[in-house]
Image (tube, grey):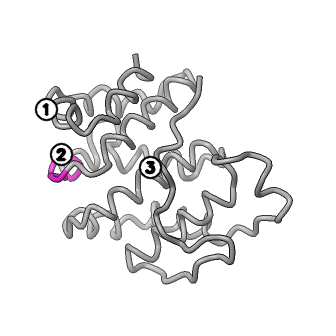
Amino acid sequence: MTAAIAVLALSDDLKPQLLRLGVFDVLIPLTESESIEVQGNSAAALGNLSSKVGDYALFLSSWNQPSGGIHGYLSRFLASGDPTFQHIAIWTLLQLLESGDSKLIETINKSDQVIKAVREISEKNVEPEDEGEEGEDGEAEVVALAKRCLEISGTGVVPPSDKSDGGSSFGGNPAYKT
């Protein structure tokens, strides 16, 4: 079900309907599921729902609730050490920062836990031979997205790496594959 919601959440036409139906109340707690697949798919759905929705009030009201809210999900996935989970969280965070919603950006910037985790990821040294091994889910992409998040948030201007222009050219959420 979470994989299906993640796919449905890609549709710009369905996003507002899914948000109105209250999927946050279901998806956010599922990012703590015992099943890694459910965790990843729930996070991918949240990431897809965070892209270009226009009104980010729900993201603000769900920052801490339910089950730790968006903040808890981002904090857990960023600190997980799992490159795929970090990728999903960084991509979600980038969408939220690119929203242009000043209250949401301010809320994100006030989260020392999230900003610290993003900064740590952005400072990782990625060996050139490691970059091609994991494809889109590679550590180099995660590091580049983390740097972009810091640039947009204004919490730490980090020059883009040599291989990336630092832009959000990533083609989409690294949807978790079951």
Q: Position of residue 153 (x, y in %)?
A: 38, 73
- Horizontally, is 105 left or right of 123 in the view? left
Q: Residue at x 65, y 72 (%)?
A: 123
Say which residue label 3 marks.
74
User: How busy is the neighbourhood of tag 3: few (under 14 within 10 Å), some, or many (20 plus)?
Assistant: many
Q: Report the mark closest to the observer, 3 or 1.
A: 1
User: Mark 2 to mark 1: distance in Å?
Assistant: 9 Å
Q: Position of residue 36 (x, y in %)?
A: 58, 26
Residue 58 in the magenta stretch? The answer is: yes
Task: Please give the range of residues in magenta.
Answer: 54-60
Q: Secondary structure at mark 2?
A: helix
Residue 52 in the magenta stretch? The answer is: no
Q: Secondary structure at mark 3?
A: helix
Q: Residue at x 64, y 48 (%)?
A: 136
Pick whichever, 61 or 168, lies toward us: 168
Q: Residue at x 45, y 37 (%)?
A: 44
Seen from this angle, which residue lies furthest top?
1
Q: Earlier in the sequence, mark 2 or mark 1?
A: 1
Pick whichever, 142 or 105, lies toward us: 142
Residue 20 numbered mark, or none? 1
Q: Quadrant of the C terminus?
A: top right
Q: Amino acid at mark 2?
A: Leu
Say which residue label 2 marks.
58
